[in-house]
Amino acid sequence: MNQQTTKYDKVLQELRSEYHVLLDKYLPKLHHASHEDISLKKLSTMEVVKKIRQDCISVCSEAVEGITFDGEGEEEVIKEMLEYNYDMADIKYMKEAEKLNLFYFLQKLNKNFVKRTDPEWFVFGIHERLQNGKVDLGPIGSKRTQFCKCCGEEVYISYEPVGQNQ
């Protein structure tokens, strides 16, 4: 296991090195562009730096969300997706027709929506609304109706990848 950690650390160090090269190239461009941008002229230098920092963190987060699993990992992702308002037909459609990154999509679900096993599913009366036909289930696949984690309201989602290679 120590060898794996060592290999991992070497690759991580390589990533850091390449990341710093990219930052050295783009940070001055971002800084200059932010001062030229009319909407940002009113910002102080510290506000510009904070904005650039936050945007860089956002870019990194989006890239990391693109990590996918194959084989057993994908099976775990599918199993968890079935805990939401999806069935296997939806997931098959997402994979084959929509060509979605299921891991990335699951992260969005975990952040925003109620699972069938969550207490909120019953507290918000979602199960009753579904049984009584008071919910428009929406189309197949990623656009299937989900339920807000905060209030239980129906959410008609659609998947729009952000710089993802599908």
Image (tube, rainbow, N blue to C red):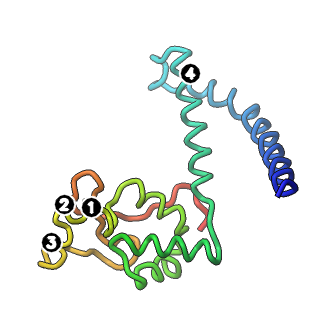
Answer whether labels 2 and 1 touch (C-beta < 8 Å): yes
- Toward which corner of the image does residue 21 lie, by quadrant? top right
The quadrant of the picture occupied by the N terminus is: bottom right
Residue 11: x %, y % from top left: 82, 50
- Tag 4 or tag 1, which sits nearer the N-term? 4
For mark 2, what is the residue? 123
Residue name at image x 12 percent, y 78 percent: 132
- Tag 4 or tag 2, which sits nearer the N-term? 4
Q: Hey, what amino acid is under mark 4?
A: His
7 vs 64, left or right, is right
- Tag 1 or tag 3, which sits nearer the N-term? 1
Q: Hey, what amino acid is under mark 2?
A: Val
Answer whether labels 2 and 4 touch (C-beta < 8 Å): no
The quadrant of the picture occupied by the C terminus is: bottom right
Q: Nearer the viewer, residue 8 or 21?
A: 8
Q: Which label lies toward us, 3 or 2?
A: 2
Residue name at image x 22 percent, y 53 percent: 151
Q: Which disc number belongs to residue 35?
A: 4
